[in-house]
Image (tube, helix red, strand yellow):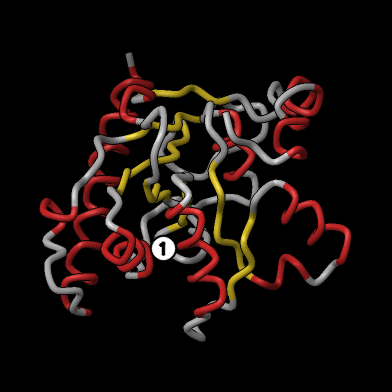
Amino acid sequence: MKMTPMYRFAKTLPQMIVRPILPVRVRGMENMPKEGAAVICFNHMRNSDPVRIFFASHRQIFFLGKSELFENKFIGWVLRSVGVIPIQRGRGDMTAINYAGQHLENGDLLGVFIEGTRSKDGSFGQPKAGAAMLAWRYHVPVIPCCITAKDGKLPKTFHKCCVTYGKPLSQEELGLVSGKSSEFRSASRMIMEKIQEIRAEDIKEFQK
C-alpha cells in the first residue's frame, strides 16, 4: 500500500501513544475504495481532526492545508512528510491545485475540509467549491465524511469521536456536467447535505 515513509512510521509507535488520547470509532469503512483516486470531503472542528482521520483510514490521505501551518520550518517539514499540501486560501492557488491533481492522477486519496476553516461550536459552515472542481477536473468520485462528537458539538480530548464515511458520489450524481461555477456550488451544497445526514445518523448511534 502506497504511503510516504513518515506516514508509515506514524502508523506504528506514534499511533500507539496518541490514539488513547484521541479515541475514534470508524463507520462506513466499506465506502472507502481499496484502490483508485477519490476526493474525501470532511467537516472541520478541531486541529486534531487530521489525527483522528489518520486513525480512521487504512490508506494514506493526502490533504490540502493552509499555508500558514508551514511557516515554522520543522512543522512544515513534518506536514509535507505526511502528505499535506500547502495552499494559500482565497488566492486561487493553482500550484497547490495542480499538485493535488497529480495525486488524483496517481490514484491517491485527497482529503479536503470542505468548509475551508474550523467550526467554533460544532455547527456546519458554508461549503467551498474547490473539492467539486477537483472531482470534475480529474474525473473522480467524492466521498462525504463526517467527524462527530458524542454530544454533536466540539470533540474533546479522551472523548470518543465517530468518523463515518458516506457512499461515494459520482459526477453524475453531483450534477457535474460542463464544469460551470454554478455546478460546483450546487455540488458542494449536496456534499455538505450528505455530511449533515451522516452527522444525524452518528448521533443516533451514540445514543444506542
In this view, 193 is above or below 55: below
Expressed as whole percent of the image width and height from the top left, the position of residue 12 reads 76, 22
> In terms of secondary structure, where does tag 1 sit?
loop
Q: Left or right: where does residue 170 sit relative to residue 17?
A: left
Residue drawn 66% across and 72% down?
67
Quadrant into which the C terminus falls: top left
Write down the quadrant of residue 28 in the picture.
top left
Write down the quadrant of residue 5 in the picture.
top right
Task: Report crowding for label 1: few under 14, some 14 to 19, many 20 or more residues within 10 A (C-alpha).
Answer: many
Expressed as whole percent of the image width and height from the top left, the position of residue 90 reads 49, 82
Looking at this rendering, what residue extends furthest in the bottom direction? 91
Looking at this rendering, what residue extends furthest in the right direction? 74
Q: Left or right: where does residue 69 sit relative to residue 200?
A: right
Write down the quadrant of residue 131 in the picture.
bottom left
Residue drawn 59% across and 29% down?
55
Q: Amino acid at mark 1?
A: Glu
Residue drawn 19% across and 48% down?
170
From the image, tell me which residue sits under label 1. 115
